[in-house]
Amino acid sequence: WQFDGSHSIKLICVRNGFDDTNFTYDDTGQVHELRVDDCGQVVVHDFPQIAVAGEAHWDKFQDIGMSCKATSVAFIISSIYPAADGKNQQVAISDVTFWG
């Protein structure tokens, strides 16, 4: 993400997986571990696995605590949880919100 100027980032909220419907969530992988770059620090975040759509909080935001000023932010995905059937290797992040 590129920002207009430098912005303070205290929190990044992520909806992990394709949370459109139970089917799309189950049929698409989720991020297991990602690295947040370009924020003056490297933050590695390990997401918990929510294996099946409909489990508690499967469509809720998960928080990544930060404390930086940045003009851009990059996510580098280092590992994934595969889709429920194990066949589809696509991965999705449905929403990302930055808070300063």
Image (cartoon, grey):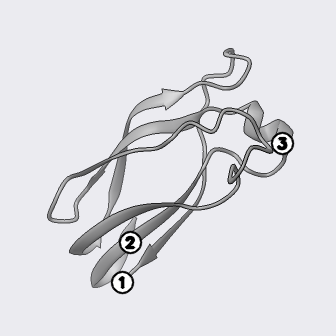
Q: Residues within 10 Å of mark 3 (few under 14, many from 20)?
A: some
Please provide percent x and percent y for residue 38. 22, 60
- Quadrant location of residue 71? bottom left
Q: Secondary structure at mark 3?
A: helix
Please provide percent x and percent y for residue 33. 39, 38
Please provide percent x and percent y for residue 88. 68, 21
Residue 28 sits above or below residue 66 on the image: above
Residue positioned 38% across, 72% down in the render: 11
Residue positioned 59% across, 24% down in the render: 82
3D distance between C-alphas at marks 1 and 3 = 32 Å
Q: Secondary structure at mark 2?
A: strand
- Position of the C terminus, as image quadrant, is bottom left
- Position of the N terminus, as image quadrant, is bottom left
Tag of residue 62: none
Residue positioned 42% across, 67% down in the render: 12
Q: Amino acid at mark 2?
A: Leu
**Mark before the other along the chain sequence, 1 or 3:** 3
Tag of residue 100: 1
> For this rendering, which residue is in front, 21 or 72?
21
Q: Are marks 1 and 3 in contact (CB under 8 Å)?
A: no
3D distance between C-alphas at marks 1 and 2 = 7 Å
**Mark before the other along the chain sequence, 1 or 2:** 2
Left or right of residue 45, residue 47 in this image: right
Please provide percent x and percent y for residue 16. 58, 49
Residue 79 sits above or below residue 58 on the image: above
Tag of residue 11: 2
3D distance between C-alphas at marks 2 and 3 = 27 Å
Where is mark 3, residue-wise? 22
Left or right of residue 83, residue 5 in this image: left
Residue 85 sits above or below residue 69 on the image: above
